[in-house]
Amino acid sequence: MQNNIDVAGLLKSISVMIAALMGPSTEVVVHDMENAEIIHIENGHITERQVGDLEDANTINLLSQSAEQNNTLIGYLSTAKSNKPLKSSTLFIKDLDGKLKYTLCVNQDISAFKSAMDLLTHLTSTFTYEVTDVQPGGETIKQITTKLIMEEIFKAKPFSMDSKEAKLKIIQQLDDKGVFDVKDAVPKVCELLSISQATLYNYQRELRVRKEKESTRK
């Protein structure tokens, strides 16, 4: 990034504008990715965070890996500590060498919208990415698959991503959506979950055994 541009200051100004436009149900947060720290936040009551808070290592690692292939992630489902459903979008700001420096994240609290789904369907909808189709915007299958994986990982929060059970749950959800039928999905899932392919295959076998046992009980 050019030294004469105050990127952090610019992102803070953009955050103020977005929050003023969208209202108190939308949180806008700027992360300094080098320090894994929140340097600005609007409407922090939504996720109960404030300036100076450090993001957990798993989330930082996930965002950093996602930024390698994407400049933005739009409309994925995440969850606040209070279990509020959030419609989230992230902008990755990189330097000229492609290193991730900042993220600008917009988190919309859609819990109130969900209670009026019949009237506010458009506002409550989160984008669903079909792994068999390329989106009109030119997204590749790999990008769509990454978004599906991220969505399932963020759904798992606030559970620890170091937990085997959390990873098993994510793998089951991805399997149900057909993610593993997509070419190169396995190494991407392994990368984002920080597990080896051998571990992934072991987890899949364990899930199949569990499902078979549940079927015999019925």
Image (cartoon, rainbow, N blue to C red):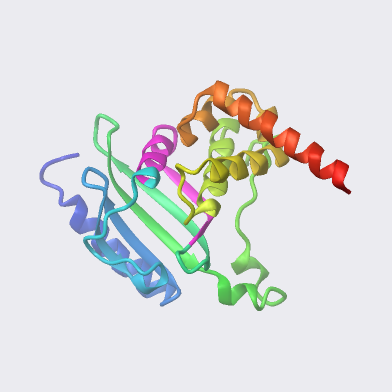
* Residue 145 at x, y percent in the picture: 59, 36
Q: Is residue 84 left or right of residue 135?
A: left
Which residue appears farthest toward the top when viewing the image? 198
- Among the 4 quarters of the image, the one containing residue 211: top right
- Residue 87 at x, y percent in the picture: 52, 61
One can see residue 43 in this view: no
What residue appears at the point 39 percent right and 38 percent down from the top-left corner? 67
176 or 73, which lies in front?
176
Q: Nearer the viewer, residue 156 or 11?
A: 156
Residue at the image point whose x is 64% and y is 45% from the top: 129
Q: Which residues are magenta?
A: 60-79
The residue drawn where x is 55% and y is 46% is: 166
Does residue 199 lie above or below 25 as drawn? above
Residue 184, picture quadrant: top right
**Quick check: can you spot residue 170?**
yes
Give residue 123's position: percent from left, percent from top: 59, 68
Q: Residue at point 50% right, 24% down? A: 196
Work out which quarter of the rendered image holds the N terminus and state it: top left
